[in-house]
Image (cartoon, rainbow, N blue to C red):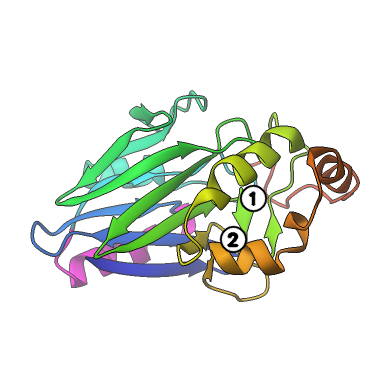
Amino acid sequence: MLFRQLYEKHSSTYTYLIADNESKEALLIDPVVDETDGYLRLLNELGLTLKIAMDTHTHADHITALGKLRDITGCETYMGQQANSSCANDSFHDGSQIVVGKLTLTALHTPGHTDDSYSFMLEHAGQKYLFTGDTLLIRGTGRTDFQNGSAIEQYSSLFDKLLKFPEDTWVYPAHDYKGWMVSTIGEERQHNPRLQVKDVVEYKQIMDNLNLPNPKMMDVA
């Protein structure tokens, strides 16, 4: 497996490139439109063919590159079935298998940040990788106050799905604002302040009182 973590500084977005070494088929998770030329250059340098580009959810802080990548490369573009997005020509649902060469990612519906939020689980060489979008961040969780967000649904996504994975599962979020690149489920269980709650009522109280400003690119995105 070939794996790269790419970064877009204006929205602090991580994009993930995953490719099968044998078939040279590649997948991009959460690509940002302003970085399209860089993605294409890297794919060319590594001798990869982009098969799929997909988003973990509808983004409010940047413009997705799904449509542009589809137009340029002819790749398939996927979003969750709840998104109803014109940027995507197919959708996935909870439990969907996304296949690139000999690699398989499993889609997990993890709503709360948005109603169309998904995470992806990849297992390779005995190691589990979780791409958690904005549902689970490093030492944080995604806000739940717009785009049909729900603190109650997010609590369930976290405690009933993502935190059920083994402690050594790698956690790769869609954003980080402190420069942290990766965590594990065990680290987040122990050190993420949003997860040190006794129940869903306490979690909802925290999330309902964040009073965050709207993302800078929300209206455009």
Q: Quadrant of the N terminus?
A: bottom left
Q: What residue appears at the point 17 percent right and 61 percent down from the top-left corner?
A: 48
Question: Viewer-proximal residue, 78 or 208?
Answer: 208
- The three-letter amino acid code for the residue at tag 1 is Asp
- The three-letter amino acid code for the residue at tag 2 is His
Picture quadrant where residue 12 is located:
bottom right
The residue carrying pointer 1 sits among few (fewer than 14), some (14 to 19) or many (20 or more) residues within 10 Å by Cα, namely some
What residue is disc 2 on?
Answer: 175
Percent position of residue 38, x then y: 36, 66
What residue is disc 1 on?
Answer: 61
Picture quadrant where residue 152 is located:
top right
Percent position of residue 111, x then y: 60, 35
Q: What residue appears at the point 80 percent right and 43 percent down from the top-left corner?
A: 199
- Marks 1 and 2 close (CB-CB < 8 Å): yes
The reply to whether residue 153 is in sight is yes
What range of the chain is rendered magenta?
A: 32-48
* 39 is within the stretch colored magenta: yes
Which badge, 1 or 2, is on the more N-terminal residue? 1
* 98 is within the stretch colored magenta: no
Percent position of residue 14, x then y: 50, 62
Q: What residue appears at the point 38 percent right and 33 percent down from the top-left corner?
A: 95
The residue carrying pointer 2 sits among few (fewer than 14), some (14 to 19) or many (20 or more) residues within 10 Å by Cα, namely many
Query: What secondary structure is marked by label 2?
Result: loop
Q: Is residue 55 left or right of residue 28?
A: right
Query: What secondary structure is marked by label 1?
Result: loop
Q: Is residue 27 left or right of residue 162?
A: left
